[in-house]
């Protein structure tokens, strides 16, 4: 009893103490009431991370939901009486466990044939199998169309294609999700509300910038933010009118772009108009690319156009390149300066793609290796080593997806590592970066200057930040590009900085999720290639600025200042979006029937 | 598409690598953010290398010891307080690395891991990052004056709560009018060193407490054993000498008279390994932080010592070095029934709703602590003169540590008061002061009397 009463006494005393503190705190709060910006920052810095987390969660759940749902486009009637669904536009048939249609018989080759959907019809291709492929007893030399009721014979194993009950028009534009709607209706999170939350975040953030700037406000800040909100709203309305219902990917990206503008409002308001222009151009590029990519045949033709354009840009960069911050990666077009290598990324991702039949027949990826070599070679020549690493990483991912040959990939990596070491030891500019890596505090005011400042100011922001516009890291060179993670941490808090990081990681995970239900390996490779570019850039940017990796000066997608990077990032996003084909029309028909009945 | 899904794992691996990197950064951040933010170029906290806004430093009674006013460092208004507490607060330029300004600058700056450098109303609000020390500035002044210009240190702490109430180090200077230290290098040698926390000295006879503890634990019937002292003894050709012939002595008497011959023999009986173990238990060679400040370790490398070396080690010579604070904490542990309470400098503000447990650790067996305490009490009564410490109920051990042929020995006095109302343990070191009980004992007497008169 004594112990309890003593404890209670101590507890009451301390409770009293805490209560006193709270009273004191509240009184200080009201004493400062005339200072609007203090009060505003005080409240908003807590609200913003909560908003950001809500937006993030509201966006990722719908994107990851139903990813297993992938219904049949057609059926194959097997000799044993079972029905095997055909789920993709491209399906491999063979003995291998990784085939989409597994026929576990010894006389069937590991990857025997591919059945593909092209131009409104189905096509069977022999992959050079031993047993051969026949359609209605006719030998398939290379490939042959198949129709409803046709017998496909895989080395004597007969299957009947059943198209009855399936609407065979799958060519609808990927921009419209109308067909996919019914499935989501039950548990759908309203996109409109998420969009409103994003606008709220941007408005609250914008007011914070205005409040902290006081009299020194640059007029570009409110103007750009208002225009951006108009752009976002237009974008939303246009997408909606096109029947687009699932905009989580776009919304997350708009959220990142909004943060990008908030950072620039504080760090370099002079580049706001340019950046807004780049965002608009990026959104348009995204729109156009999505449209092109939704038609596979068109996309395959555009691929060669893009690669040719990219080669042109490489040459242009070598000839006209101007050096900034040690890398000759800018060209001046008179009215505007661009970083051509950013645009080469788009072609690079698409250059490595292939449809499943091509992928399984031509294991040779010499052309892609050649193109990659050209890109990386130019990057080394212009001394943009960070971007070279981004290209090389994406090359590894794409090459692996193309060939599945990890031994060759390992060999290439070893060779590249050797080359990299040579480069590092012979070029003093790079060598100095590497010298500081891992112990930047020993070079705090020389080669570790940017990294130590990033860490100092990231730590100053705490969880919630010191308030947008109140930071000091922005006065350090390249703060709004290379050190942007630090700027977010300082001004908006480490919570939001981590959220930005996770959004980009999420792009990667999303791309992997999409692969399973992809119509064509073309899209799967493009999406994974684009996502790996995002991931590698993010790793180099964020970890470089906090001394986990060497500082290489690449941009953080959508968040760093830079017009070329912004446009290229939006374009790469189109590749990811185009791989999202998870819901099949069959279910829609089922729903329509239900609808008629109901 | 199964094939491509299996290959898309490459992207998943990449994502996982990124998340791993983020976790690494997170761990770095949690561990090091405080250090990062305290880098003096941080414009949120510093201007020209000086904290922009600093919390005030108070002593335990609420007297201001340090503050920053209009961008200038201000210390106490009283010159002797400023001088006596210079090592506690630190000087104008941050030369004292254990001073509160440097050691606790994270707290003074108002930085914390949740809010970073953000402060609600930047200018006026220092509340929440003021710092109250456990020190009593009056007692510190008394202690500094008692040292009377001699180099050395005085420490007093409460062995029940761990609060250090007195911490002075001499030489010192008035931090508001710093002298040109380089001009008089002899007078100011080691002036930026807080000798209580950062210095190590040869312990001399105060180490006999540890030898005695080991003896009580390890030698059967040690309380009845009798050692014979002829004033000197030769061990393997090495002479161990006493100031006088003590004749037949028990352990108690040997401790009271600090008989080297007896303790030399005891050390030989114990052996180097046992003695090493007890020295480490008492804190030698061990890392200790009080409120984040590193305390000098002290060294004991006696496990391989034999013969004469071991005998000299048992009486606190040989290669032993001891940190004063650690010896004080050891005396506190004896006083507290063998349980050592971690000393501390920051006054607990009792803000948390849940009463917290302090870092207590058993240093000695309870019985051993009691026996040893009685012997220390006996030493005061029979050897140091109870008259000098009347009514204090003092238990102590003196030390006169030889530091070389041509120099006077360091003078040590370590002990505690066996009083419920003033559970204080203390240490005094006067460098080259001479006799431990006379010189350091005199300082201790003055300081302890002042402490109980408050």
Image: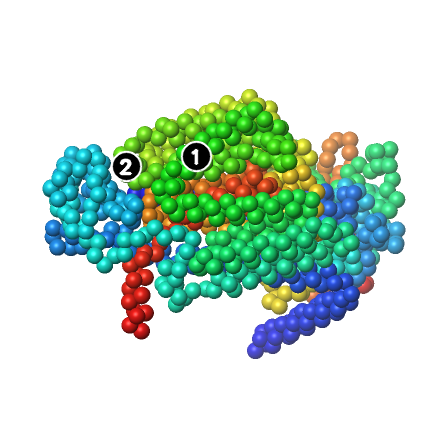
Residue A469 x %, y %: 69, 51
**Residue appearing at x 73%, y 32% in the figure:** B404
Seen from the viewer's position, the closer of residues A120 and B160 is: A120
Disc 1 target residue: A305
Quadrant of the rendered structure where residue B42 is?
top right
Q: Secondary structure at mark 1?
A: helix
Specify the quadrant that holds the C terminus of chain B.
bottom right
Separation of marks 2 and 1 at Cα, in angstroms = 24 Å
Badge 2 crowding class, 10 Å Cα cut-off, few under 14, some 14 to 19, many 20 or more, is some
Seen from the viewer's position, the closer of residues B357 and B282 is: B357
Residue B44 x %, y %: 72, 49
Seen from the viewer's position, the closer of residues B436 and B19 is: B19
**Residue appearing at x 62%, y 28% in the figure:** A323
Residue B389 x %, y %: 78, 57
Does A189 sit above or below residue B385?
below
Seen from the viewer's position, the closer of residues A86 and B378 is: A86
User: In the rendered view, does A511 fall on the left or right side of A441?
Assistant: left
| Chain to which mark 1 belongs | A
User: In the rendered view, does A406 fall on the left or right side of B385?
Assistant: left
**Residue appearing at x 32%, y 52% in the figure:** A170
Disc 2 target residue: A360
Residue A132 seen by the camera: yes
Does B451 sit above or below residue B86?
below
| Chain to which mark 2 belongs | A
| Numbered marks: total | 2
């Amino acid at each position: 009893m004594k112990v309890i009463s003593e404890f209670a006494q101590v507890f009451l005393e301390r409770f009293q103490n805490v209560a006193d503190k709270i009273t004191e705190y509240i009184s200080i709060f009201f004493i400062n009431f005339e200072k609007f910006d203090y009060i505003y920052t005080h409240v908003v810095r807590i609200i913003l991370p909560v908003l950001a987390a809500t937006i993030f969660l509201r966006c990722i759940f719908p994107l990851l939901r139903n990813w297993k749902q992938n219904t049949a486009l057609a059926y194959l009637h097997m000799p044993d009486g079972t029905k095997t669904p055909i789920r993709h536009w491209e399906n491999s048939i063979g003995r291998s466990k990784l085939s989409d249609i597994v026929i576990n018989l010894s006389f069937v080759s590991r990857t025997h044939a591919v059945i593909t959907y092209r131009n409104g019809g189905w096509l069977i291709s022999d992959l050079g199998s031993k047993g051969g492929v026949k359609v209605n007893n006719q030998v398939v030399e290379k490939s042959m169309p198949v129709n409803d009721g046709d017998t496909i014979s895989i080395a004597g194993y007969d299957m009947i294609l059943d198209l009855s009950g399936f609407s065979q028009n799958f060519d609808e534009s990927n921009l419209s999700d109308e067909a996919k709607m019914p499935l989501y209706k039950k548990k759908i999170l309203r996109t409109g509300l998420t969009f409103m939350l994003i606008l709220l975040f941007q408005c609250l953030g914008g007011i914070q910038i205005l409040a902290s700037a006081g009299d020194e406000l640059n007029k570009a800040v409110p103007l750009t933010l208002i225009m951006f909100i108009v752009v976002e709203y237009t974008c939303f309305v246009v997408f909606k009118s096109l029947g687009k219902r699932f905009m989580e990917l776009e919304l997350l990206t708009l959220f990142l772009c909004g943060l990008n503008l908030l950072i620039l409002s504080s760090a370099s308001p002079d580049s706001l108009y340019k950046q807004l222009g780049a965002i608009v151009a990026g959104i348009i590029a995204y729109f156009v690319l999505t449209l092109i990519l939704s038609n596979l045949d068109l996309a395959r033709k555009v691929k060669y156009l893009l690669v040719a354009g990219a080669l042109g840009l490489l040459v242009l960069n070598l000839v006209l390149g101007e050096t900034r911050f040690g890398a000759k990666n800018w060209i001046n077009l008179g009215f505007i300066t661009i970083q051509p290598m950013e645009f080469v990324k788009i072609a690079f991702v698409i250059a490595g793609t292939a449809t499943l039949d091509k992928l399984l027949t031509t294991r040779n990826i010499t052309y892609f290796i050649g193109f990659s070599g050209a890109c990386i070679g130019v990057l080394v020549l212009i001394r943009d080593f960070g971007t070279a690493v981004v290209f090389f990483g994406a090359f590894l991912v794409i090459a692996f997806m193309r060939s599945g040959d990890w031994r060759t990939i390992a060999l290439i990596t070893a060779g590249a590592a050797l080359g990299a070491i040579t480069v590092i030891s012979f070029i003093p500019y790079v060598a100095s970066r590497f010298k500081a890596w891992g112990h930047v505090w020993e070079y705090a005011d020389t080669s570790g200057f940017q990294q130590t400042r990033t860490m100092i100011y990231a730590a100053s922001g705490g969880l919630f930040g010191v308030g947008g516009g109140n930071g000091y890291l922005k006065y350090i060179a390249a703060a709004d590009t290379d050190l942007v993670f630090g700027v977010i941490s300082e001004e908006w808090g480490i919570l939001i900085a981590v959220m930005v990081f996770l959004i980009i990681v999420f792009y990667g995970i999303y791309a992997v999720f999409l692969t399973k239900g992809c119509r064509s390996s073309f899209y799967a490779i493009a999406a994974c290639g684009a996502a790996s570019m995002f991931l590698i850039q993010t790793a180099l940017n964020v970890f470089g600025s906090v001394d986990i990796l060497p500082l290489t000066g690449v941009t953080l997608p959508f968040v760093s200042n830079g017009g070329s990077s912004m446009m290229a990032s939006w374009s790469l996003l189109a590749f990811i979006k185009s791989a999202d084909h998870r819901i099949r029309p069959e279910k829609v028909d089922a729903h329509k029937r239900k609808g008629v009945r109901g | 598409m199964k094939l491509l899904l299996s290959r898309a794992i490459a992207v998943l691996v990449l994502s996982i690598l990124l998340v791993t990197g983020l976790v690494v950064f997170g761990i770095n951040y949690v561990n090091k953010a405080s250090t990062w933010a305290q880098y003096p170029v941080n414009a949120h906290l510093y201007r020209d290398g000086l904290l922009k806004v600093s919390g005030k430093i108070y002593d335990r009674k609420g007297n201001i010891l340090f503050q920053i006013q209009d961008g200038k460092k201000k210390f106490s208004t009283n010159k002797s307080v400023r001088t006596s507490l210079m090592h506690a607060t630190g000087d104008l330029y941050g030369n004292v690395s254990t001073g509160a300004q440097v050691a606790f600058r994270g707290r003074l700056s108002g930085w914390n891991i949740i809010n970073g450098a953000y402060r609600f109303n930047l200018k006026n609000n220092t509340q929440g990052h003021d710092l109250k020390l456990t020190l009593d500035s009056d007692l510190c002044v008394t202690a500094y004056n008692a040292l009377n210009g001699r180099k050395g240190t005085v420490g007093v702490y409460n062995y029940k709560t761990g609060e250090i109430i007195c911490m002075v180090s001499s030489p010192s200077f008035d931090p508001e009018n710093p002298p040109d230290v380089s001009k008089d290098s002899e007078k100011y040698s080691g002036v930026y060193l807080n000798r209580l926390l950062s210095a190590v000295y040869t312990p001399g006879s105060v180490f006999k407490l540890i030898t005695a503890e080991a003896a009580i634990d390890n030698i059967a019937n040690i309380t009845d054993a009798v050692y014979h002292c002829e004033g000197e003894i030769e061990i393997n050709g090495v002479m161990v000498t006493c100031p006088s012939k003590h004749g037949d002595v028990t352990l108690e008497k040997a401790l009271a008279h600090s008989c080297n011959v007896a303790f030399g023999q005891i050390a030989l009986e114990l052996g180097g390994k046992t003695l090493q173990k007890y020295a480490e238990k008492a804190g030698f060679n061990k890392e200790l932080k009080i409120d984040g400040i590193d305390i000098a370790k002290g060294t004991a490398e006696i496990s391989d010592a034999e013969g004469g070396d071991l005998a000299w080690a048992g009486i606190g010579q040989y290669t032993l070095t001891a940190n004063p604070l650690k010896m004080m904490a050891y005396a506190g542990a004896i006083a507290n029934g063998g349980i050592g309470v971690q000393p501390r400098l920051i006054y607990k503000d009792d803000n948390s709703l849940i009463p917290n447990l302090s870092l207590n650790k058993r240093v000695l067996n309870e019985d051993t602590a009691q026996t040893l305490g009685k012997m220390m009490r006996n030493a005061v009564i029979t050897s140091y003169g109870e008259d000098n410490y009347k009514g204090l109920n003092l238990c102590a051990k003196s030390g006169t540590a030889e530091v070389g042929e041509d120099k006077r020995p360091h003078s040590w006095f370590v002990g505690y008061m066996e009083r419920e109302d003033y559970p204080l343990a203390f240490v005094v070191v006067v460098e080259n002061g001479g006799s431990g009980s006379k010189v350091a004992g005199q300082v201790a007497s003055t300081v302890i009397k002042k402490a109980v008169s408050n």
